[in-house]
Image: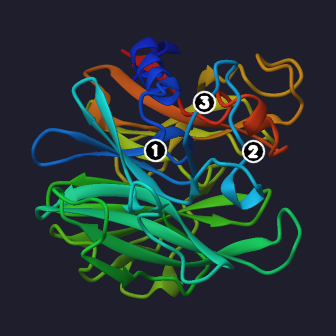
Amino acid sequence: MPAFAGSQPDAELNGLFTRYATDNRRVDDWTGADGTYSTTLPDGRLAFVFSDTFLGKVNKDGSRSPVIEEGGTTPFLNNTFVVKDGKKLTTVTGGTKSAPKAIMPPRDKKHWYWAGDAITAGGKVQATYQEYERFGPGLWDWRWHRNVLAQFSPKRLSKPTSVTPLPSSKGISWASWLERSGRTIYIYGVEDKGTSKYMHLARVRGDSLKSRWEFYTGKGWSKREADSVRVMDGVANEYSVSRLGRGYVLITQDTTEIFSTKIVAYYSCSPQGPFTGKTTVYTTPETGLTGTYKNANVFTYNAHAHPELSSKGRIVVSYNVNSLKNTDHYKDSSIYRPRFVDVRFR
């Protein structure tokens, strides 16, 4: 079993996204987001897959205007891409430069899509999305509705070539992670019960997530989503299971604690676990009154790996930072950006 050898913030990646967010030479691009998945395109560029995204201008004091829907000038979209080509970042949205829209636009004002993991396979970018719906006026009056697959041409990420429903009958969000192993793609999901969250696992043979799914039953595989079992608890809505040496490492925010600052790793010899050896590999410094923002509303969440950016014995991990108070994002635009950490193993 690999041994944890230390971790530290990734200064290069954190600096790259900070400079990009605060560079006002263009005011129609990315200034902050969450989600933060990534996939390598066929030409070697890297596509970051984001959910809720602020565009627009960042002021010299780090503040931003409220979003357009609240009377300000800041565009706010539920999903975008940012493409990394060397040290250059480029924002990809739907719509036009003057009127940007989400890559996956909503059917109406009560629905929206948040991004899950994506994989480049079969010459296409295959991205998982979760559709959510609002059912009341309250801050938390929304819920997961269904899963879909959006396929994109790597040369045109601004609009999907197809959108296909994915299994959604059991209340599992099949968007947490995609891991290819040989000719199999493993699809990791989460059953979100609020204070308790559970890992589920499915797989497809070949290069297409449109192929027939099989669901892990604890003893084997079934064609029926109803047979999917809880693999373990304690995972976040977003997590990763990626190769490390001869085995697999699970990276997740520790959801056995409310608003946990701990990013933890587990280990397994197989994609389906069991995952053991729980180890805290990083403690996020931003959270709460004792954190770097000295703000009780600030929290961190949804840590996972970026194998495309990692190297032998080193895994690049991102996590998201947010605030329970929406106006904090206007006062300090630095809150709502991903952070990157280098986690080392031996």
Q: Is residue 310 visible?
A: yes
* Residue identified by numbered label 2: 256
**Which residue is at the front of the view, 31 or 282?**
31
Q: CA distance from mark 2 to mark 3?
A: 36 Å
> Which label lies toward us, 2 or 3?
3
Q: Position of residue 211 (x, y in %)?
A: 23, 80
* Residue identified by numbered label 3: 58
Quadrant of the frame with the N terminus: top left
**257 sits to left or right of 40:** right
Q: Amino acid at mark 3?
A: Val
Q: Amino acid at mark 2?
A: Thr
Q: Residue at x 25, y 21 (%)?
A: 312
- Compared with 335, 4 (above or below) is above
Q: Quadrant of residue 248?
A: top left
Q: CA distance from mark 1 to mark 3?
A: 11 Å
Q: Residue at x 40, y 54 (%)?
A: 97
Q: Is residue 269 visible?
A: no
First in residue order: circle 1 vs circle 3: 1
Q: Residue at x 33, y 33 (%)?
A: 89
- Compared with 218, 250 (above or below) is above
- Compared with 182, 217 (above or below) is below
Q: Secondary structure at mark 3?
A: loop
**78 sits to left or right of 246:** right
